[in-house]
Image (cartoon, helix red, strand yellow):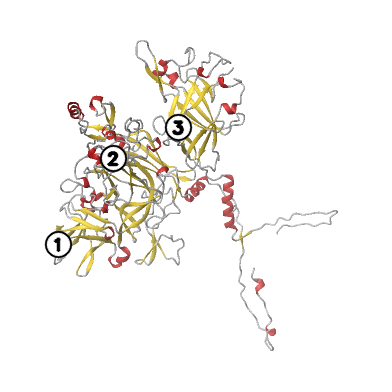
């Protein structure tokens, strides 16, 4: 009774003159400052599993590693009269060129071929090629330390912010109608009126996966009789796989040209029409922030692992080379590589593009091309056209079999923000080259803190979920001043690759939590106040090592007080116009209990 | 206090122990005890230490920021004792020692990569001090004989000369890489060492013995057999945790291996 000092009892007659004595009752509040001591309370079993888990959950250090299987088809042949390049091609017309050179004695014969695999490989191995990487008359002197960074740079990045203003462009495959839109406007579409399941239907055909479901609503970029919100009645257009690209609303007899065939616009997904503001999706280009420098990457060969396509090489006899030097030239290789970093990534201090804890990191690969085979076209403002960027829907060729206008030098919307560097060599440049040639160009290395564009995404506050609509691709093109492959110079064929490869470090729950801040403790700071529910909503962050019954979760090694997530990546360098979209996944064989 | 005590008149001073059973505890103490539990666990189990290793490459040097490191190993025909008349050229940079029988590998063994040759290797040991009485060997680098430069040799009087391996190595990021990188702890917290002392040995797969190497030929020493072991059996290797590189120094603290080869000479016992 720690409060007994605070209580004074006074006899009634002493309170004032003639006051009577009365019976007094008062409640004594009992404040307990002690509790029963339970045996074994002070005994604790040391549970190593629990200690391990505590350390695992408390650690925020990530050491990401991955293995690259490099797939490449050396597709574009050309010619050059720059001797260090010409003498190191994989020749395709060696017989005729050698005969022509022999008969005419000319030194400007066009030896046609493809650049050797070393121009695309992750680690160059041509460190001792006389006349190219070693004197005399070398293109440049090979620095062995740079063998793994001459062609490509490797980084770790994360989704940092969203760009809602990026201009986009796609072509409707069926009508070749051009769709131009701002990414924040939503999903582009073109209207086609059809009859679906016996009902008149307005179909909206999209060049990307719309991510909508039957029963949800769609907010269009235009309105009909004052309304722009319509319920989705069905998906697809009776063709295989069209459900993901086509959504339909019932044609109740709309008048005028609002829903005529060929009308284009943009649409946003709305889950509940009565709570449009709370349940509408937003659309943006995720921007990735670089967390490491190029010097932090440690790229090595993955033991003896090679892809199934093998190495393609041939012996170039001395009589069939322009400089009469015999050698072995390699067209395509098959080596796999492993990538790690000598810098750790601490994820607690950083938040993703939705201001949530980091659950995804990205292996970011950027072509550097220091040997100068690529880029090189002046941009008219003192610089050069470097890497171009686009999304999956920009990759197909146009209706005449040429690269889409999106990739043209005249379209600055496809320019990346990665600067281009330039240098010259001591070697003389043949006249046809030097007329406009200003130097060999390459992509300068990114640094920690740089921000580059990423995937085209959708976010729903009500769903608390981000969906990648389309992956970003980079495109590299040959420098026509030093290697001519033909075609329109301002929009020539090239190679694509996907720069960002996601590495899942943690996952959010597949359920959505909600709570009132007045009676729920522990509402995370990344929660969203839903005006629909009048509650805060969020997805729980699963602990490391926890995988729920649906298979959602991550479990990867934890040792040295550090997490070691790993990913296998198939890195494709895709020639323009080839079938880049390899969605078919071969399922694991079924294992029954008998096995 | 339910015990029954019987007090009698003492003849001297007596004391009794009163067992007081406490059945209560202060609130709030649990929290501090939980913290204390963590402290105890750290004391008895410890916290996770970072044993991750990194690769340290040879520090670039001018000109052209080269990174290659060269090792040349010289062998001596041990059938001839070292004496005052021995000169440095008696050590040769070849697996084929002078007077090849019984010393040295034959050119045929080397050319055809016979097992006695391919099972041989150079071993670079890295210690924390050059005091052989107290040093600890922290790691070892093996350089296989299949790497290295070549020399011309005859394997038959009926055929032209062929190129066979010689113990001269140029190690770098590309080409011959085995032995170029030092793999050492990334985190300095566990073992804060940045200076090592490197010694070299050659395992002779032909004889099954280790041959000790030193950084000067014994011919250059005033006393061929009594000398400062720390000075002649070790080179200093300093690693830089910031740049992830290493440099090699001789006993005078001059950088070696930056362009010119680091030479190791077979040591001959008296």
Q: Where A3 falls versus A363 (above or below)?
A: below
Badge 2 and badge 1 in a common chain: yes
Please, which chain is the residue tagged with disc 2 on?
Answer: A
According to the picture, the residue beneath numbered tag 1 turns out to be A260
Select label 2 or label 3 by which is in front: 2
Q: Earlier in the sequence, mark 2 or mark 1?
A: 1
Q: Residues within 10 Å of mark 3 (few under 14, many from 20)?
A: many
Q: Residues within 10 Å of mark 2 (few under 14, many from 20)?
A: many
Select label 1 or label 3 by which is in front: 3
Label 3 near label 1: C-beta < 8 Å? no
Label 3 near label 2: C-beta < 8 Å? no
- Work out which residue is located at the far top of the displayed protein and give it: B157
Measuring from the top left, give residue A152's x and y in whole percent: 34, 41
Choose top left, top right, bottom left or bottom right for residue B223: top right
Q: CA distance from mark 2 to mark 3?
A: 31 Å
Measuring from the top left, give residue A421's x and y in whole percent: 33, 45
Q: Nearer the viewer, residue B48 or A20?
A: B48
Q: What label does residue A89 carry, if any?
A: none
According to the picture, the residue beneath numbered tag 2 turns out to be A373
Q: Is residue B236 left or right of residue A362?
A: right
Q: CA distance from mark 1 to mark 3?
A: 70 Å
- Residue at image position (81%, 54%) is B14
Q: Nearer the viewer, residue A353 or A531?
A: A353
What secondary structure is marked by label 1? Answer: loop
Please, which chain is the residue tagged with disc 3 on?
Answer: B
According to the picture, the residue beneath numbered tag 3 turns out to be B180
- Number of numbered discs overlaid on the protein picture: 3
């Amino acid at each position: 009774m720690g409060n007994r000092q605070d209580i004074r009892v006074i006899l009634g007659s002493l309170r004032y003159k003639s006051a009577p004595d009365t019976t007094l009752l008062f409640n004594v509040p009992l404040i307990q400052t002690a509790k029963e001591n339970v045996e074994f309370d002070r005994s604790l079993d040391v549970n190593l599993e629990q200690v391990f888990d505590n350390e695992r959950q408390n650690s925020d250090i990530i050491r990401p590693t991955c293995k690259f299987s490099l797939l490449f088809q050396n597709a574009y042949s050309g010619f050059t009269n720059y001797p260090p390049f010409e003498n190191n091609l994989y020749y395709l017309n060696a017989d005729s060129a050698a005969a022509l050179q022999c008969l005419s004695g000319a030194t400007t014969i066009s030896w046609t071929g493809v650049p050797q695999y070393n121009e695309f490989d992750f680690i160059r191995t041509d460190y001792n090629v006389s006349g190219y990487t070693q004197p005399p008359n070398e293109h440049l002197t090979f620095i062995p330390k740079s063998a793994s960074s001459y062609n490509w740079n490797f980084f770790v990045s994360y989704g940092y912010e969203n760009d809602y203003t990026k201009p986009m462009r796609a072509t409707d495959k069926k009508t070749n109608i051009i769709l131009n839109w701002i990414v924040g406007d939503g999903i582009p579409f073109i209207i086609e009126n059809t009859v679906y399941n016996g009902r008149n239907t307005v179909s909206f055909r999209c060049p990307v996966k719309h991510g909508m479901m039957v029963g949800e609503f769609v907010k269009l970029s235009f309105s009909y009789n004052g309304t722009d919100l319509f319920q989705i009645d069905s998906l697809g257009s009776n063709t295989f796989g069209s459900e993901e690209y086509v959504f339909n609303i019932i044609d109740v007899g709309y008048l005028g040209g609002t829903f005529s065939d060929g009308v284009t616009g943009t649409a946003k997904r709305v889950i509940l029409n009565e709570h449009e503001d709370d349940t509408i999706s937003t659309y943006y280009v995720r921007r990735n922030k670089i967390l490491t420098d190029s010097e932090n990457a440690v790229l090595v060969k993955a033991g003896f692992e090679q892809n199934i396509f093998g190495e393609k090489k041939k012996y170039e006899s001395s009589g069939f080379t322009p400089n009469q030097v015999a050698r072995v030239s390699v067209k395509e290789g098959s080596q796999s590589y492993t990538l790690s970093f000598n810098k750790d990534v601490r994820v607690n201090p950083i938040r993703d593009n939705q201001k949530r804890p980091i659950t995804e990191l990205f292996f970011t690969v950027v072509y550097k091309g220091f040997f100068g085979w690529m880029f090189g076209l002046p941009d008219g403002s003192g610089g050069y056209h470097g890497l171009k960027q686009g999304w999956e829907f920009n990759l197909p060729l146009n209706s005449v079999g040429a690269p889409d206008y999106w990739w043209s030098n005249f379209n600055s919307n496809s320019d990346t923000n990665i600067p281009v560097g330039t240098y010259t060599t001591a070697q003389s440049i043949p006249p046809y080259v030097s007329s406009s040639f200003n130097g060999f160009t390459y992509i300068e290395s990114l640094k920690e803190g740089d921000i580059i564009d990423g995937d085209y995404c959708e976010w729903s506050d009500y769903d608390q979920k981000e969906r990648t609509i389309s992956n970003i691709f980079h495109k590299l093109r040959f420098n026509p001043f030093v290697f001519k492959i033909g075609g329109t110079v301002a929009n020539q064929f090239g190679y694509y690759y996907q720069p960002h490869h996601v590495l899942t470090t943690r996952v959010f729950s597949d359920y959505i939590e909600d709570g009132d801040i007045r009676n729920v403790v522990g509402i995370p700071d990344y929660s969203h106040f839903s005006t629909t529910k009048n509650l805060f909503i969020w997805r729980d962050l699963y602990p490391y090592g926890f995988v729920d019954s649906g298979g959602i979760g991550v479990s990867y090694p934890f040792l040295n007080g550090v997490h070691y997530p790993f990913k296998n990546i198939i890195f494709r360098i895709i020639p323009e116009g080839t079938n880049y979209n390899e969605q078919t996944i071969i399922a694991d064989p079924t294992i029954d209990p008998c096995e | 206090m339910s015990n029954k005590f019987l007090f009698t008149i003492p003849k001297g001073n007596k004391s009794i122990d009163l067992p007081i059973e406490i059945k209560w505890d202060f609130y709030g103490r649990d929290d501090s005890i939980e913290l204390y539990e963590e402290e105890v666990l750290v004391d008895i189990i410890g916290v996770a230490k970072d044993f991750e290793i990194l690769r340290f490459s040879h520090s670039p040097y001018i000109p052209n920021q080269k990174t290659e490191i060269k090792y040349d190993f010289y062998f001596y025909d041990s059938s001839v004792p070292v004496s005052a008349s021995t000169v440095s050229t008696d050590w040769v940079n070849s697996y084929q020692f002078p007077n090849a029988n019984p010393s040295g590998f034959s050119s045929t063994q080397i050319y055809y990569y016979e097992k006695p040759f391919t099972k041989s290797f150079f071993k670079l040991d890295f210690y924390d001090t050059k005091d052989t009485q107290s040093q600890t060997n922290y790691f070892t680098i093996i350089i296989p004989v299949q790497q290295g430069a070549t020399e011309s040799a005859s394997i038959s009087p009926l055929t032209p000369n062929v190129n066979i391996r010689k113990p001269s190595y140029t190690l770098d990021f590309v080409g011959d890489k085995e032995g170029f990188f030092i793999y050492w702890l990334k985190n300095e917290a566990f073992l804060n060492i940045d200076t090592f002392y490197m010694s070299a040995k050659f395992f002779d797969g032909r004889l099954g013995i280790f041959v000790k190497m030193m950084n000067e030929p014994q011919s250059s020493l005033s006393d061929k057999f009594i000398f400062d072991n720390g000075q002649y059996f070790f080179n200093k290797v300093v690693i830089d945790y910031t740049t992830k590189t290493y440099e090699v120094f001789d006993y005078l603290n001059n950088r070696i291996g930056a362009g010119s080869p680091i030479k190791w000479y077979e040591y001959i016992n008296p």
